[in-house]
Amino acid sequence: MASTDLGIRTGEPAGPPIVPQGPARLALIAITVAVLAQTLRSALPQYDHFADTAGTAVAGAVVLAVYLAGFAGPLIRKAAGPRGLLLAGVGGLLAVRLLAQALTPQTWLAFVGTAVGMIAVGALYEGARGLSGVGFATATVAGLSADGAVRMAFATWDASWRSGIGPWLACLLFVGLGAAALYRELSSGAVAAPGISWQDAFGAAAFGPFLALQVLVLSSPAFVASAGWLSLTAAHVVIVVGQGLALAFLASGLAVRAVPGGVCVLGGTLLGVGAGAVAGTYAVAGVEVVPVVIVGQVLSAWLLAVACRAPLRRAGVGGPVQRIDVGAATGGLLIGLILVSYQVSALEPMPFPNNLLPGLAGIALAALAAID
């Protein structure tokens, strides 16, 4: 059975009381997710420029190495402790975001931002430890919602690609609030980590396909407008409705009920089939996109809540916390494999239809939720 409770299982020692879901901790997750999405989107065009000069093979190897940076998380934890991981991941990501606003788009900065972002994926679970899976998923969806609202203010452009006072204010808002939340988290002390099995630790990898689906399809106004034959405003309304229903479902209490792993697989399969049907070379277009996006928001948020329950718990037996860092790094690698492969498919022929990529993201999210 999979559920979104604390993950305390029969026969395991009871742990300390749940950490309060204070606004600072939830804000830290939301802002980190929003800035990570901004950083990854801004980096993708720079990879194209790099491939034009360095060649596809070299560019592919370098980009793969950058997306493997998350596997440095266990080493950072060992050298600097959990606070060091938070500072390197979340603090580094905020610094990169500020630098991206100050400079013109740079290829080296795209690589640095992606590498730091992969470390930040692991740091997310460190900063959120003790929250429920529902709390983590709620903050994640809220962060993507805030990111989408800011993008719409700049006609779907990321603020880092724009100059002027408006983009700077948006940047400083994210960075300032994120820095304040990070300071609060660092000053409050680390939350004790549980022993954890490899199976449970790999629930942390679910964030990867979840974010890839959001960037490609579910939280992209430009995609929804193009595929759904809608105006940008109408496309944003569709996304907001989906996110609102996802948040309402998470808050309803229904999302915390135990469910068989097979139900997770069924939900993820529907999510993957829907995403694959509307995104890619052989995608359908028109009004069919609207229900796929709305239902997809609810399904993806629910599956993320189920999958990340175990990596966030405070009670359990098993191996060291570094296993969660490895699981999160695997999720970061999945982000790169899905996003970069989908982008490459628009420029180079692939041995399979690119519709398969968002479809596999949904199925991978389901599988990771089902095994926990």
Image: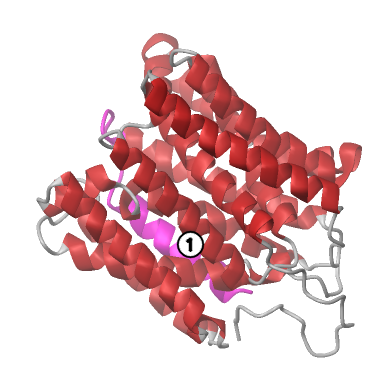
Q: On the rendered structure, is 350 left or right of 278? A: right
Relative to 42, residue 108 above or below: above
Q: Given the image, on which type of amino acid does mark 1 rest?
A: Ala
How are the residues colored? secondary structure
Q: Quadrant of residue 5?
A: bottom right
Q: Who's the residue at 47% across and 59% down the image?
A: 141
Q: Quadrant of residue 296?
A: bottom left
**Residue marked by disc 1:** 364
Q: Who's the residue at 42% across and 75% down the image?
A: 248
Is residue 15 at least partly visible in the picture?
yes
Q: Position of residue 274 (x, y in %)?
A: 27, 65
Is residue 273 at least partly visible in the picture?
no
The foreground one among 6 and 55 is 6
Determine the residue located farthest toward the top in the rendered image: 53
Q: Position of residue 181 (x, y in %)?
A: 68, 47
Q: Who's the residue at 52% across and 36% down the image?
A: 173
Q: Position of residue 91 (x, y in %)?
A: 69, 35
User: Is residue 352 a member of the stretch shown in magenta?
Assistant: yes
The foreground one among 237 and 202 is 237
Q: Position of residue 247 (x, y in %)?
A: 44, 69
User: Is residue 157 a member of the stretch shown in magenta?
Assistant: no
Near mark 1 (Cα within 10 A), the count class, few <14, some 14-19 or many ≥20, is: many
Q: Quadrant of the N terminus?
A: bottom right
Q: Quadrant of the C terminus?
A: bottom right
In the image, the segment drawn in magenta is 345-372
Q: Who's the residue at 51% across and 81% down the image?
A: 255
